[in-house]
Image (cartoon, rainbow, N blue to C red):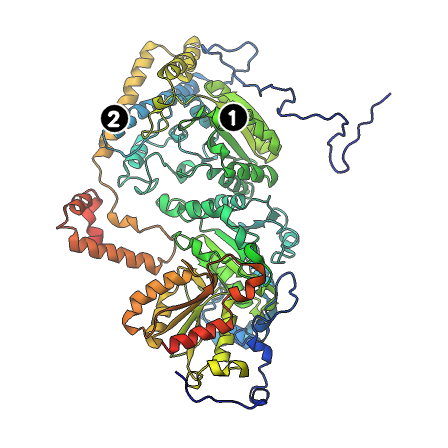
């Protein structure tokens, strides 16, 4: 199905869209990566809040110390923000948790000196070795220890150094943490447990520094799973997770630790768990994702609207004005089916994007639920754009992760089904 | 001439030039860690042994609880055989280990058990009605609202954490529980966590993880290994090659003792001292209690498939923890045949009364199937699934006989989901 081919002049882009550098098209451009990873496309993302006002107007923000009679204008007028990257925002959240909750402790491998991703910088100095401390190298020990603390009503903020290494703790998390409230008839619970862990690809991580294991935990009812896309989201969702009365696995996309920078309120604030966020409203197709791929999806929307010259012939003119609704799921368990289903009922089309492999990834569960809820409204099958069903091979990463091109390809395919 | 022994730069490890290997904790080849005992096989105090200072009241309480355990086990084992409860685990042969250690702890020390430690709950006043309710999974089951198999007790009131089936998971959890005690001003230097596990469970990775954490963080846990010789059918000779569990303690740098688990007074002494050291150092202490599992692993096991009856009968006769202590009590003039008869009859009557009562009660409401998965706001999937079961019960609950009879077992006959 080909519409008339529109060939813009060579200078079309710089004149019409001066604010869009060409590197926007290469959301996964190759350059020597710093150890902590770097995602160039994030730097120009409009989804990050670069002004104080934009940050303070973030949907769903609540301030625990707020007087409920205050109006939001007063709050926007009064509160301060600071430029933070993701690891600084995560650190800020933990320092607030430690400050306000005497029973909170932070522990894991190498957290005392600041952490391999700097998420715990200065916390041991500020709060002391009794509250911020290293553990021996044992994920099952870290998880079990955290469960024990939480059993006694303390706030255990545990770190698993890479999500790839969470599996020794699988028994403690799935058989114990997830089930303690249910099996004890509610007389015990480990709501005070939060497990933080860096997740997703980093550019050079290979099999064991790139995994997205969220789907492995979806079947462990009793757990919550949260994945933030940006510094502001990370701070609010982490504070929300720490205070949620259920054990939460908080997965932080590691490539965003340094790459994502935005204005973040310096106060104590929370964002809601279990709620997705519509980032770009639309009417023709629902694009659902979480974590790092949010930025590949944003790039894909640009590519759809204004394809670079090399891709013009692949993106029919008639589709370039399609309005795609971009949703960040944020919470994977429980996930916000209401927001997604309402969107798909309007658009009739769903594309789910995640880094984890295709088979039995979170997209599979979402697809099954959406096809059930929206069956008669669907104009096309639910399309999943994901990592392949292979481990994450180092040299092949660019072809493994769902990049902007694969996303726009899926959008075009779904729109033209 | 003084010998100047060199050490490695940053440790106290002395430098030697003789190539030699070692494989015992004591350093002497083939030598095992000794076992601490104060009463001999006949219940007589060993010369020079320090008998714990206990009065008659305390001794009778010890003995009564040691007899309550098998009285309970006798009835509940048979009740399972009759099909009234689904499963049971007895503690035959381990009464001194369990009651002796319970008696050495404070009532609010946090206990994390494996599954054979109901005696600790009985010592702390958990009633027979509570026990029965959990085993029957009826509407009075405060341990778990009927959600777990029998013997999975739990009670915050008695500081006894809910038992779970996966083995050894409680070992690192105990390190965390104990750390919370360190961080609670009113309990620091006063309370410990006590963690029980069998010699088989000690093979799990969680044992190593728990030992590491409790010794390095550190946190005050008294770890009590019940070495009863079997992990279902696997004898301890097939469970480890080293010298039991006690040999591992020094590997973690923690104070360790091996005690005769069938000598209730030795267990009392050992656990009291272990607790004292634990509080003093704020660090884990390991006690290995040597005992023997007289009964089957559980009602799902027939141990005569892997051991001779004579072996069991001999152990019951030669080294019976209850008989040993009774001889000691009698030698002090604290016990006699009449008291024995009276006690046995009273305990049996108490257990039977609780059993009959529990047998008559219904299960919790059927909707409890869906409660307590999450705290706070209930997620949509739980809500939706409860409604789905409700729809199915309304549609088929009266017509389908298997469902009809099953619903009748629940309090209010399923009305909470039908209505």
Q: So how many labels did they put on this image? A: 2
Q: Are marks 2 and 1 on the same chain?
A: yes
Q: Position of residue B90 (x, y in %)?
A: 35, 26
Q: Nearer the viewer, mark 2 or mark 1?
A: 1
Q: Which mark is residue B288?
A: 1
Vertically, is A294 above or below B211?
below
Quadrant containing the C terminus of chain B in the rendered view: bottom left
Quadrant of res B94 = top left
Quadrant containing the N terminus of chain B in the rendered view: top right
Helix, strand, or loop for circle 1? strand
Q: Residue at x 61, y 48 (%)?
A: A133
Vertically, is A139 above or below A126?
above
Q: Which mark is residue B352?
A: 2
Subunit that carries the residue with mark 1: B
Give the Cα distance between marks 2 and 1: 34 Å
Would you say residue A75 is visible in this rendering? no
Q: Residue at x 80, y 27 (%)?
A: B5
In-front residue for pair B313/A10: A10
In-front residue for pair B187/B224: B224
Q: Position of residue A91 (x, y in %)?
A: 59, 59
Q: Earlier in the sequence, mark 2 or mark 1?
A: 1
Q: Residue at x 51, y 53 (%)?
A: A195
Subunit that carries the residue with mark 2: B
Vertically, is B168 above or below A181?
above
In-front residue for pair B309/A221: B309
């Amino acid at each position: 199905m080909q519409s008339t081919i529109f060939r813009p002049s060579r200078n079309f882009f710089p004149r019409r869209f001066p604010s869009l550098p060409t590197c926007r098209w290469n959301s996964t451009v190759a350059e020597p990566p710093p150890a902590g990873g770097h995602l160039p496309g994030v730097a120009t993302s409009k989804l990050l809040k670069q002004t104080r006002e934009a940050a303070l107007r973030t949907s769903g923000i609540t301030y625990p110390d707020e007087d409920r009679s205050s109006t939001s204008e007063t709050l926007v007028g009064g509160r301060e923000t600071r430029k933070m990257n993701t690891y600084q925002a995560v650190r800020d959240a933990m320092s607030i948790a430690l400050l306000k909750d005497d029973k909170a402790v932070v522990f894991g491998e190498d957290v005392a000196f600041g952490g391999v991703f700097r998420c715990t910088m200065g916390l041991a100095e500020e709060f002391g070795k009794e509250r911020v401390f290293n553990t021996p190298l044992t994920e099952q020990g870290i998880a079990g220890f955290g469960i024990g603390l939480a059993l006694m009503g303390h706030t255990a903020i545990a770190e698993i150094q890479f999500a790839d290494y969470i599996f020794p703790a699988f028994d403690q998390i799935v058989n114990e943490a997830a089930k303690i409230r249910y099996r004890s008839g509610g007389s015990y619970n480990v709501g005070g447990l939060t497990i933080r862990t860096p997740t997703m690809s980093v550019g050079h991580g290979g099999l064991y520094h790139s995994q997205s294991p969220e789907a492995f935990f979806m079947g462990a009812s009793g757990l919550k799973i949260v994945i933030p896309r940006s510094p502001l989201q990370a701070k609010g969702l982490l504070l929300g997770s720490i205070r949620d009365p259920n054990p939460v696995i908080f997965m932080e996309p590691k490539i965003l630790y340094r790459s994502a920078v935005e204005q973040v309120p310096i106060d104590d604030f929370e964002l809601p768990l279990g709620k997705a966020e519509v980032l770009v409203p639309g009417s023709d197709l629902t694009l659902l994702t979480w974590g790092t791929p949010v930025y590949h999806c944003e790039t894909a929307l640009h590519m759809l609207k204004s394809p670079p010259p090399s891709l013009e012939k692949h993106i029919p003119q008639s589709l370039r004005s399609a309005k795609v609704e971009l949703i960040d799921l944020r919470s994977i368990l429980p996930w916000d089916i209401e927001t997604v289903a309402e969107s798909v009922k309007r658009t009739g089309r769903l594309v789910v994007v995640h880094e984890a492999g295709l088979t039995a990834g979170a997209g599979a569960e979402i697809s099954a639920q959406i096809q059930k809820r929206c069956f008669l409204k669907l104009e096309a099958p639910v399309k999943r754009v994901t990592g392949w069903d292979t481990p994450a091979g180092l040299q092949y990463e660019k072809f493994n992760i769902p990049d902007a091109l694969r996303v726009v390809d899926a959008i075009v395919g779904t729109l033209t089904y | 001439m003084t010998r100047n022994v060199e050490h490695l730069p940053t440790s106290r490890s002395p430098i030697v030039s003789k190539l030699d290997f070692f494989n015992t904790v004591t350093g002497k080849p083939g030598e095992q860690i000794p076992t601490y005992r104060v009463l001999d096989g006949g219940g007589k105090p060993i010369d020079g042994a320090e008998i714990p200072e206990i009065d008659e009241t305390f001794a009778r309480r010890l003995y009564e609880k040691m007899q309550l355990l098998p009285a309970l086990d006798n009835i509940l084992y048979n009740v399972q055989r009759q099909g009234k409860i689904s499963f049971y685990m007895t503690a035959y042969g381990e009464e001194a280990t369990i009651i002796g250690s319970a008696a050495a702890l404070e009532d609010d020390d946090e206990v994390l058990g494996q599954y054979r430690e109901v005696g600790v709950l009985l010592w702390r006043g958990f009633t027979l009605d509570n026990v029965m309710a959990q085993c029957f999974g009826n509407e009075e089951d405060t341990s778990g609202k009927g959600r777990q198999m029998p013997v999975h007790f739990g009670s915050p009131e008695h500081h006894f954490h809910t038992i779970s089936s996966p083995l050894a998971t409680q070992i690192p959890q105990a390190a965390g529980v104990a750390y919370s005690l360190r961080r609670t001003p009113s309990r620091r230097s006063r309370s410990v966590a006590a963690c029980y596990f069998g010699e088989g469970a000690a093979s799990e990775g969680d044992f190593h993880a728990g030992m590491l954490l409790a010794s390095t963080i550190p946190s005050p846990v008294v770890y009590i290994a019940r070495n009863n010789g079997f992990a279902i059918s696997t004898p301890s000779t097939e469970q480890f090659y080293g010298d039991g569990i006690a040999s591992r303690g020094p590997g973690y740098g923690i104070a360790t003792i091996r005690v005769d688990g069938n000598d209730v007074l030795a267990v009392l002494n050992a656990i009291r001292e272990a607790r004292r050291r634990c509080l003093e150092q704020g660090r884990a202490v390991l006690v290995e209690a040597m005992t023997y599992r007289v009964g089957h692993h559980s009602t799902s096991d027939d141990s005569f498939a892997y051991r001779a009856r004579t072996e069991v009968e001999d152990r019951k006769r030669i080294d019976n923890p209850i008989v040993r202590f009774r001889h000691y009590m009698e030698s002090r003039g604290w016990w006699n045949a009449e008291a024995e008869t009276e006690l046995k009859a009273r305990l049996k009557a108490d257990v039977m009364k609780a059993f009959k009562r529990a047998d008559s009660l219904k299960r919790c409401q059927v909707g409890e199937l869906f409660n307590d998965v999450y705290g706070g706001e209930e997620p949509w999937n739980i809500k939706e699934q409860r409604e789905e079961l409700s729809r199915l019960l309304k549609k088929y609950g009266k017509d389908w006989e298997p469902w009809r009879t099953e619903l009748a077992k629940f309090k209010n006959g399923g009305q909470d989901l039908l209505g």
